[in-house]
Image: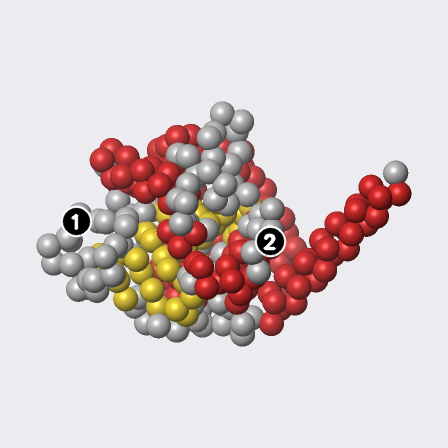
Amino acid sequence: MATIKAQDLRRMIRRFRVLIMGRANAGKMTILQKVCNTADQPEIYDPNGKKVRVMICGIHPLTDAQCGNHDITNEMMFKSTPGFVFHDSCGFEAGSEEDFENMKKFISEHAHATELEERIHTIWYCIPMDDLSRTFQRSEEKFFQECDTGHVPVVAVFTKFEALRPFTYGEIKKQLQGVSDEERSKRIAERVEELFTKTGVLGRLCVPENLVHPNSYVRLQNMNKQNTNCDTLLESTTFALDDGELQSCLVSTQKSNLELCIKCAIATLVDCALRERLIQSDDSL
């Protein structure tokens, strides 16, 4: 099968389409703003391209008539990065069975769409870590057990990861007395890892019975601070994609992210070299 050139594929899909999922207050809007390097609110369009009047309700901007009646098919776009289009799943997480079925239908249709322009290219599932008793709820369980995402890569995004540090410090506060700052930081980091493992959330995401398994996961912290970014999320998403041209399309939305561009270029060169070596090995047999 002939390979579609990156620039041709870019013309065919025009925009990289992301479905962002997760409970209210998981930090989804902040993630989108960081990814698009803006503090502005997104512009919202319905499936027919008509601009939607905005009322911010959680992450999702709604029309007056739609407030409380979320539509996952609406498209969110930021002027700063027109190469992205986002969809928000907000609704089913609150326990609405109808919204859950609508979300499943939307994912299935857009994961298997014949038109490249209509496909979802990745799913970011956000799980906040600021409440250890609620890291994995019924909403996450239903999504990973029941949704058909096709070949669309899913990245689990653990947000508000910095919230684990106060829990950790409270547990080992006495043990930290009299130790150096370097040793203090080391012990806290080690305990954070133990605490994260203890939640069992990774294990529950990856059980064999699940219909969906995350292709990768990232931890985001201090996203409310100006000097933070979502480079790890973009990098993880790029390498979760199984199509080199689609990777190039994502990278092209991040032209100012030199580090990501370099990493992707190196990975592409390595992959090409390995393929060439395999071809030469086959020819020599």
Which quadrant of the rendered structure holds the C terminus?
top right
The residue lying toward the viewer, choosing from 28 and 240, is 240
The residue lying toward the viewer, choosing from 194 and 125, is 125
Q: Is residue 47 visible?
A: yes
Residue at image mark 2? 3
Crowd around label 2: few <14 · some 14–19 · many ≥20 (10 Å): few
The amino acid marked with disc number 1 is Gly
**In the image, is 172 to the left or to the right of 82?**
right
Residue at image mark 1? 68
Q: Is residue 14 above or below residue 149?
A: below
Residue extending furthest toward the top = 209
Mark 2 element type: loop
Spot occupied by residue 234 in the image (x, y as percentages of width and height): 52, 59
Q: Is residue 100 visible?
A: no
Discs 2/1, front: 2
Residue at 41% over, 70% down: 81
Residue 215: quadrant of the picture: top right
Q: Is residue 255 above or below residue 165?
A: below
Residue at 11% over, 58% down: 64
